[in-house]
Image (tube, rainbow, N blue to C red):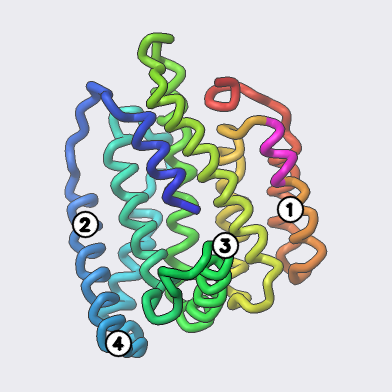
């Protein structure tokens, strides 16, 4: 879901001459990310999920999901995009490490794609229940981080001359759009799935509602319409308390304004 968006953004930004310096906050996030990854790996190796319910892990999750510290309220500039991509990549790694915890024990790598996909879904549902308290902080941070990428990615891409908008970068834009569609679809389908922790689902749909204007602005109108139908279905199967957020998402998807990345 997220990997297509990240890899696409990286391809779009590739070959850029823009220099990016690493700040103290990003260094702190890197250190916390490394510590968290090591703790998850250790818990997975020892098959002891309770190792991820310690105060140390809680403090790391608080840091890794600290929007005020790591996500600016003001727009990011093109010069910040390299750091932002790295930040979102680390946030994605943290989310996926919990969502796919103990993957090797539950998914047959030699199975056919349909079987493997089903096993992954079952595992993610199980881990949603186990790690719901952690994911409801980490995953919304990731969604909001992705939304922050769109404006500087748009600014960078529309500034390119036809010669600079290479086939590699066009492919990157296509991958980024695929990632955005998968992000919307993944959240909307989980919202109506009672197998997922309700507070986790609530945090996800709220984050998507807040981020939808930025995320949807990069999508062509046809993709917005496709996602709109999924949002309608989610509204029928999700708790009424999610209604306000889903309505916000639907209104955003109904917007037919198409400029920036959408127009490319």
Q: Is residue 163 left or right of residue 40?
A: right
Residue range of the region highlighted in magenta in the rendering: 221-227
Number of other residues with Cα within 10 Å of mark 1, as a class: few under 14, some 14 to 19, many 20 or more: some
Question: Is most of the magenta stretch helix, strand or loop?
Answer: helix
The alpha-carbon separation of the residues under discs 3 and 2 comes to 24 Å
Which residue does the numbered mark 4 point to in the structure image?
A: 51
Considering the numbered disc 4 on the image, is that residue within a helix, a strand or a loop?
helix
How many numbered discs sit on the rendered protein?
A: 4
Residue at the image point whose x is 60% and y is 68% from the top: 201
Residue at the image point whose x is 28% and y is 83% from the top: 43
* Label 3 vs 4, first from the N-terminus: 4
The alpha-carbon separation of the residues under discs 3 and 4 comes to 25 Å
Which residue does the numbered mark 3 point to in the structure image?
A: 204
Number of other residues with Cα within 10 Å of mark 4, as a class: few under 14, some 14 to 19, many 20 or more: some
The label nearer to you, 4 versus 1, is 1
* Label 3 vs 1, first from the N-terminus: 3
The label nearer to you, 3 versus 4, is 4
Residues under numbered marks 3 and 2 in contact, where contact means CB atoms less than 8 Å apart: no
The alpha-carbon separation of the residues under discs 2 and 4 comes to 21 Å
Which residue does the numbered mark 2 point to in the structure image?
A: 30
The label nearer to you, 3 versus 1, is 1
């Amino acid at each position: 879901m997220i990997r297509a968006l990240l890899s696409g953004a990286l391809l779009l930004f590739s070959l850029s001459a823009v220099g990016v310096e690493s700040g103290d906050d990003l260094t702190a996030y890197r250190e916390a990310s490394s510590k968290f990854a090591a703790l998850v790996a250790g818990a997975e190796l020892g098959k002891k999920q309770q190792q991820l319910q310690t105060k140390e892990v809680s403090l790391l999750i608080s840091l890794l999901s600290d929007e005020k510290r790591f996500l600016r309220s003001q727009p990011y500039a093109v010069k910040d995009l390299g750091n932002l991509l790295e930040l979102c990549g680390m946030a994605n790694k943290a989310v996926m490490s919990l969502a796919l915890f103990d993957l090797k024990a539950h998914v047959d790598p030699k199975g056919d794609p349909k079987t493997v996909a089903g096993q992954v879904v079952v595992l993610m549902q199980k881990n949603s229940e186990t790690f719901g308290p952690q994911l409801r902080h980490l995953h919304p941070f990731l969604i909001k981080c992705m939304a922050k990428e769109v404006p500087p990615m748009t600014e960078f891409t529309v500034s390119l001359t036809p010669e600079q908008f290479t086939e590699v970068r066009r492919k990157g834009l296509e991958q980024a759009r695929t990632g955005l569609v998968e992000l919307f679809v993944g959240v909307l389908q989980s919202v109506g799935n009672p197998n997922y922790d309700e507070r986790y689902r609530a945090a996800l749909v709220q984050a998507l509602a807040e981020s939808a204007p930025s995320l949807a602005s990069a999508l062509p109108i046809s993709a917005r319409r496709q996602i709109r139908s999924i949002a309608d279905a989610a509204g029928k199967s999700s708790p009424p308390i999610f209604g306000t957020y889903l309505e916000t998402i639907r209104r955003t998807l109904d917007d037919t304004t198409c400029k920036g990345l959408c127009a490319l």
